[in-house]
Image: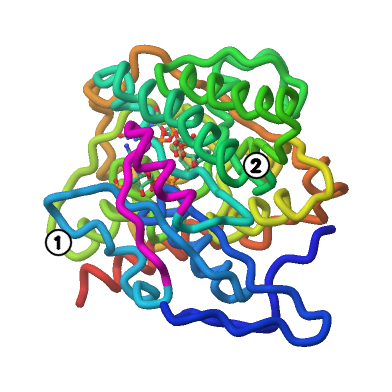
């Protein structure tokens, strides 16, 4: 294991303290997608480990810093966009990272049919642009690519492992397969420490409202508080392997601490239907989902990924990683958080 994090912690923009004795210099990490669900948990975790954290944030007419407001002063924010090569070169040159976590993406599968070319530009070509920026000025940096269980799509075997063939079922899944193979190719072609985390669905109270788990817990809270009466969803029979985002960002970090770059499935090893998620979430608020959930064809996708179930054996044995939060605890955490937010 490479030792990351140092005892010397400096979160200010001032000069770094010099190393004392055999202590290592503070490690620097660059996170793309800082403002997203995973970016916010990862930034918190790396700050706690003593890293100097740089985050790529794209221009927006709104304030995108909601999820990282509490740590905003501890992070160096760099302007940039995955669709813009020069901004990525600048971001890498400015941050001089030891580790790069590529979390930026158009991450909503549902929108990827409507924005297929854009999704490909950001989620696929964006990976190449970032790898190129790293290869030119920080070729020894360790690189993490946010690969996805959506690459398995129409699954060829269950559970899915690191060797299960890919069969993506959406423009998003196709773009992620491209990013996966570019990461693998920069490793094999240039000897870069470039790794793919193949992460199954992971959720939290910070999950975007468009994803089904958060849509459900937000809906439960609104119904409980009398703000709405029904919740319109698509396919209730889809099965997902859902874990907690806070646990999953630890796996990202562990992957980059390995001596050798590698690819690894991160999952819980349990699968549940959307219907089961509804049952527990409505139950947490003393409600029956059958009284409120309405199936609406508008939310049914052109092609569905029916079943995802990951095999986390390699993560357990190689990374020493285990998920800590159970499925029920995750649902309860999200319902409680939405009830508290909407009651305030
Ligand atoms: P989010 O949608 O919450 O966050 C995506 C982030 O990417 C946001 O910070 C967003 O910025 C940023 N982004 C989007 N487009 C661009 C762009 N053109 N240039 C720069 N930044 C951009 O996703 P998650 O945190 O849930 O996921 C993180 C990564 O992991 C993504 O790559 C996702 O595809 C992948 N993944 C996620 C899984 C999950 O279950 N959560 C499972 C497997 C993989 P802004 O705030 O401005 O929109
Ligand atoms: P997913 O997540 O597509 O797995 O991608 P999402 O929560 O959007 O869908 C999960 C399943 O629920 C079904 N579903 C609905 N989904 C949404 N969003 N809205 C609905 O109303 C609804 N009703 C039913 C979907 O059809 C699907 O089967 C997530 C993202 O985080 C990706 O970026 C990531 O790569 C994968 O997880 C792993």
Residue 135 falls left or right of residue 204: right
- Determine which of the numbered discs, if any, sits on residue 139 in the image: 2
- Determine which of the numbered discs, if any, sits on residue 246 in the image: none
Circle 1 is placed at which residue position? 226
The reply to whether residue 51 is visible in this rendering is yes
- Please provide the residue range marked out in magenta: 75-93
Q: Per the image, is 65 magenta?
A: no
Question: Could you tell me residue 330's position as x and y percent?
Answer: 52, 58
Do the CB atoms of the residues marked 1 and 2 lie less than 8 Å apart?
no
Question: Could you tell me residue 61's position as x and y percent?
Answer: 12, 51
Question: Could you tell me residue 280's position as x and y percent?
Answer: 46, 52
State which quarter of the image contains the C terminus. bottom left
State the SS at label 2. Answer: loop
User: Where 42 falls versus 7 (above or below)?
Assistant: above
Instruction: Please tell me in which quadrant of the rendered image residue 108 appears.
Output: top left
Instruction: Please tell me in which quadrant of the rendered image residue 311 appears.
Output: top right
User: Taking the image as four quarters, which one is ligand 1 found in?
Assistant: top left
Which mark sits nearer the N-terminus, 1 or 2? 2
């Amino acid at each position: 294991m490479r030792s990351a994090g140092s005892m010397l912690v400096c979160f200010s923009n001032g000069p770094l303290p010099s190393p004392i004795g055999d202590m290592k210099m503070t490690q620097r990490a660059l996170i793309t997608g800082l403002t997203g669900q995973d970016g916010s948990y990862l930034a918190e975790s790396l700050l706690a480990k003593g890293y100097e954290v740089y985050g790529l944030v794209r221009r927006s007419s709104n304030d995108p810093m909601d999820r990282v407001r509490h740590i905003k002063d501890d992070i160096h924010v760099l302007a940039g966009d995955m669709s813009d090569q020069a901004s990525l070169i600048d971001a890498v040159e400015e941050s001089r990272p030891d580790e790069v976590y590529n979390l930026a993406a158009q991450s909503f599968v549902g929108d990827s049919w409507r924005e297929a070319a854009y999704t490909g530009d950001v989620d696929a070509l964006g990976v190449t642009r970032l790898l190129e920026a790293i290869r030119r000025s920080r070729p020894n940096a360790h690189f993490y690519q946010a690969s996805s269980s959506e690459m398995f799509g129409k699954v060829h075997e269950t559970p899915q492992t690191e060797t299960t063939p890919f069969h993506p079922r959406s423009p998003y899944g196709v773009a992620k397969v491209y990013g996966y193979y570019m990461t693998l190719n920069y490793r094999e072609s240039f000897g870069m420490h470039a790794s793919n985390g193949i992460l199954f669905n992971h959720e939290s109270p910070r999950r975007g409202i468009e994803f089904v788990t958060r849509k459900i817990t937000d809906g439960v809270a609104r119904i409980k508080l009398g703000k709405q009466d029904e919740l319109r969803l698509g396919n209730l029979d889809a099965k997902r392997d859902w874990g907690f985002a806070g646990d999953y960002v630890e796996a990202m970090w562990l992957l980059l601490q390995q001596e050798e770059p590698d690819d690894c499935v991160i999952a819980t090893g349990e699968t549940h239907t959307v219907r089961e998620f509804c049952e527990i979430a409505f139950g947490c608020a003393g409600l029956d989902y059958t009284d409120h959930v309405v199936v609406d064809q508008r939310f049914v996708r052109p092609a569905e990924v029916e079943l995802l179930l990951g095999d986390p054996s390699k993560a357990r044995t190689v990374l020493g990683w285990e998920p800590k939060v159970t499925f029920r605890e995750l649902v309860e955490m999200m319902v409680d958080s939405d009830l508290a937010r909407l009651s305030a």
